[in-house]
Image (tube, rainbow, N blue to C red):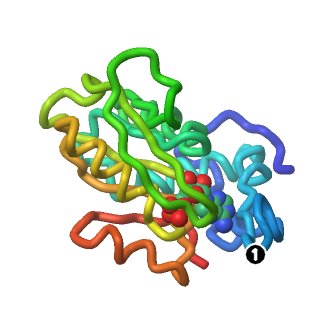
Amino acid sequence: MAKATPRQETSPKLGLEAMKALILDVPDFPKKGIMFKDITPLLADPQGFNAVIDALILPFKQKGIEIVAGVESRGFLLAPAMAARLGAGIVPLRKKGKLPRKVHSASYDLEYGTDSIEAHTDAFPKGSKILLVDDVLATGGTAAAAISLIEALGGKLIGSTFLIELCFLNGRKKLAGQTIHSVLTY
Ligand code: AMP
């Protein structure tokens, strides 16, 4: 693991291949046939984590983003640091049944199974500029649901950003017409 040093704008950045080297492929998790991308070693690396956050926000720095919406669970690891750098707030898009007040839901198919995500009905002030984040863009079902949720609740989606895009699953096709940024592609 790289030695922790206080972050400065001039601190050395990890390149894309070095970032990829810190992601572990876990075969057959959580189901047979799935090659799970374990990003925890990359996030645990001080230079790695800083490079991840910088790369995720890069195209959105001058876009006036007001809220970073993170998808449960691993989007929650990324959204707060991104928002702090952008001067934005965060909204968690949560799995079913976790939020205490009135919610709007959107359901979706996963690469492995089905699920739904929810946000409080007042989570996004009308017309507020939103950046969506998740760790992986796979089939695009989760992101499509997240986008429909944000838009149904009055947010103005500026773009979606992913640490990893699994291009062979064609997730982008489901998100046609949207601004999509991915840091690492496979
Ligand atoms: P999808 O809806 O198919 O685009 O799947 C995206 C969601 O599932 C993200 O929230 C990811 O965290 C998770 N996911 C899907 N495939 C993988 C994978 N191979 N490795 C890690 N996470 C994955």
Residue at 79%, 70% (x, y): give it.
32
Q: Quadrant of ligand 1?
A: bottom right
* Residue 137 position (above or below residue 129): below
Mark 1: is the Cβ under 8 angstroms from ligand 1?
A: no
In the rendered view, tell whether residue 92 sits above or below residue 28: above
Q: Nearer the viewer, residue 100 or 129?
A: 100
Residue receiving disc 1 = 33
Does residue 120 appear to the left or right of 163 in the view shown?
left
Side (left or right) of 46 relative to 115: right
Whether residue 85 is visible to the viewer of this picture, yes or no, is: no
Residue 136 placement: quadrant: bottom right
Residue 127 appearing in the image: yes
Q: What residue sits 38% from the left and 16% below the top?
A: 101
- The residue that appears at 68% across and 34% down in the rendered structure is 6
Residue 50: x and y, percent?
Answer: 61, 46
As drawn, 44 above or below 27: above
Of all residues, the one furthest to the bottom in this rendering is: 168
Q: Residue furthest left?
A: 127
Type of the residue with mark 1: Gly
Q: Position of residue 51 (x, y in %)?
A: 60, 53
User: Where in the figure is residue 166, as x and y percent of width and height?
Assistant: 56, 74
